[in-house]
Amino acid sequence: MTQLFKKAACFTDIHFGMKNNARQHNIDCENFVTWFIEQAKERECETCIFLGDWHHQRSAINISTLNYSISNLKKLNEAFEKVYFIVGNHDLFYRDKREISSVVFANELANIKVVDEWIVEDEVAIIPWLVGDEWKQIKKMKCKYMFGHFELPHFKMNAMVEMPDIGTIRSDHFKNVGQVFTGHFHKRQHSGNISYIGNPFPHNFADVWDDDRGAMFLEWDKKPEYKIWPDAPRYRSINLSKLLEDPETVLEPNSYIRVKVDLDISYEEANFIKENFAQNYDIRDLSLIPQKKEEHAQEVEGEIHFESVDQIVTNQLSKIESDTFENNVLIEIYHNL
């Protein structure tokens, strides 16, 4: 019996160009790809399967981001005999059709196959972002492995929000598939035969304290191995009293720290704490937030503390009272913009 792969290295949802094409984010993406290739070579993986959302912006690609994108596609092309490159919703100009994508140029690289149509071969199905009524075909599928970019109800979109059942595809539609591995939701999670493998690294404070993500390595007929990227950025939220007790545990390299001020300290003391930690630990950012005023942007003695735009919008959408719209659906629509 032929096999589509012997050993496959998999990752998903890297989102080049996220955070308004932030250079630091694109560098993190590049460093992850370098680490991923090293790990794949150690395990002698000949195949790579990317599970969707290579780019973040659907309507345009920044020139700097494009350079990072192309150089890392070339790295994957050189590192593997075959790269199956699933088109995710963020890679598509239209959400409901796949005729225009931002990754089509990857087909010009000899070892990369952009998966913008279904591939069913040698007991493996590799499926792009579903459009129209394609989801109805899933129930008819029978295979050993399925890879895709699925939006399944009752899985968590992030630590706070669960995907509602909107009456289309469901987990039980995959009952004739041995194992399903999917991207789209960034949180690593498993239920039955379905696994969201998790994105490469935390992206924002929606991923606070959730470092269980990175890459997956799958040898045919064996259990998948999940590996965390050790140099990933991390997001932490903690009370100042706890931080002062044990800063070494919290202030890890590449961390973004949000500190809730639960102690009575002066402006000068707050600045001293912030500057001292910034100088002595390899963290990227530390924000001090008055605990009683945490939910909104605050100006304290000339210094502004605020939640991310994503959190502010998510909080507001969650408070909408409507008989017409589900709050979770509105939040999902916003995150897919």
Image (cartoon, rainbow, N blue to C red):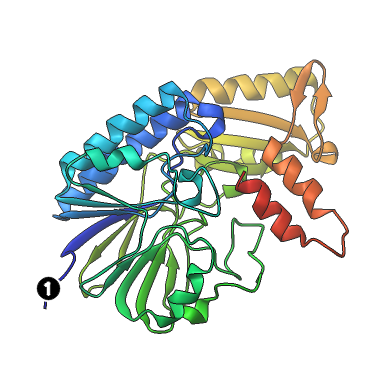
Front in this rendered view, residue 233 or 99: 99
Under tag 1, what secondary structure? Answer: loop
Q: Badge 1, how many Cα within 10 Å: few under 14, some, many 20+?
A: few
Vertical arrangement, residue 101 with respect to residue 122, above or below: above
Instruction: Determine whether, in the image, residue 37 is placed left or right of residue 105.
Output: left
Quarter-of-image position of residue 7: bottom left
Q: Quadrant of the C terminus?
A: top right
Residue plotted at (43% across, 22% down): 63
Instruction: Determine whether, in the image, residue 80 is placed left or right of residue 174.
Output: left
Q: In which quarter of the image is the N terminus?
A: bottom left
Q: Residue furthest front?
A: 99
Looking at the image, can residue 257 be seen? yes
Q: Label 1 belongs to which residue?
A: 2
Residue plotted at (87% across, 60% down): 322
* Amino acid marked by disc 1: Thr
Residue 294: % across, % down: 79, 39
Vertical arrangement, residue 186 with respect to residue 27, above or below: below
Instruction: Determine whether, in the image, residue 266 is placed left or right of residue 48.
Output: right
Residue 267: % across, % down: 78, 20
